[in-house]
Image (spheres, grey):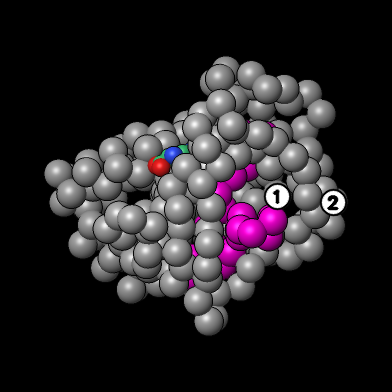
Amino acid sequence: MDAIGVLDLQGGVLEHIGHLERLGIKVRTVKEATDFENLAGLIIPGGESTCISKLMRIFGLEQALQAAFRSGMKIWGTCAGAILLATEVTGEEAFLKLIDMEVMRNGFGSQLDSFTYEATIPSVASVPLPLTFIRAPKILRVGVGVKVLLEGEGYVAAAETENILVTVFHPELTGCLAFHRYFAEKCGLMASRREIPVDPAWDRTSWTRLARLS
Ligand code: GLN
């Protein structure tokens, strides 16, 4: 139980792996049912939720994920990953139904309505963090027992329970490691709450290069 897995079917897989490696966290890709064994945590990346859910069904990963979750594996869903974890998806059938919340896909509009801003999320870091929303969903409602970490006007952008973290934005596409450190701690993999600064050398295209910036 010393590694975090990244669901490797579609979407922003390499970018999450890069951030975990920058923190010195052991990381494994998850493509098959047996890959869920002994994971402390799993990241379901952003991408296209319909595509990821179909591939999970085709490869028979749904039950294995649910079983690993019941055995204590924590899960972080970013964007499409958050959609897949919700109990309710506006106008569509929900998929994994592991966190009590309603999400509306593409809640901010089309790809062209994607945006970035900075906000302080006290539970995660004391400094403002860069947030990147790409055809993001809106979390419209969270259930009792789900803690809101960041709210916007009329929507929730980040929330958690003891075992699940959801963000509708993409920390892996910024030079900021704070969310990955926060999730690693949730998985019991990092002891220190030391602040990790935003990488000043990061720019809008950094994530497209596969450089390992350790
Ligand atoms: N719009 C995508 C969906 O509905 C999510 C986008 C993303 O993950 N950046 O699945």
In the image shown, does 128 or 90 lie closer to the viewer?
A: 90
Quarter of the rendered image showing ligand 1: top left
Task: Give the position of the C terminus as an image quadrant.
Answer: top right
Q: Is residue 154 magenta?
A: yes
Crowd rating for badge 1 (residues with CA inside 10 Å; few <14, some 14–19, many 20+) = many
What residue is rendered at 54% in x and 81% in y? Answer: 145
How many discs mark residues in the rendered view?
Answer: 2
Where does residue 193 sit, x and y in percent of width and height? Answer: 76, 61
The answer to whether residue 97 of the structure is visible from this angle is yes
Name the residue at 68% across, 22% down.
Answer: 204
Disc 1 marks which residue? 178
Residue 188 location (% of width, % of height): 57, 66
Query: Which of 70/102 is in front?
Result: 102
Label 1 SS: helix
Question: Picture coordinates of residue 108 (x, y %)?
Answer: 56, 42
Whether label 1 lies within 8 Å of ligand 1 gets the answer: no
The secondary element bearing badge 2 is classed as loop
Circle 2/circle 1 CB separation < 8 Å: yes
Mark nearest the camera among 2 and 1 is 2
Label annotation for residue 108: none
| Residue drawn where x is 85% and y is 51% of the image | 127
Q: Amino acid at mark 1?
A: Ala
Is 149 a magenta residue? no
Q: Magenta residues?
A: 151-174
Residue 114 image-quadrant placement: top right
Q: Earlier in the sequence, mark 2 or mark 1?
A: 2
Mark 2 crowdedness (10 Å alpha carbons): few <14, some 14-19, many ≥20 = some
For disc 2, the marked residue is: 127
Furthest toward the bottom, the residue is 144
**Amino acid found under the numbered disc labelled 2:** Val
Task: Give the Cα separation between the discs numbered 2 and 1.
Answer: 10 Å
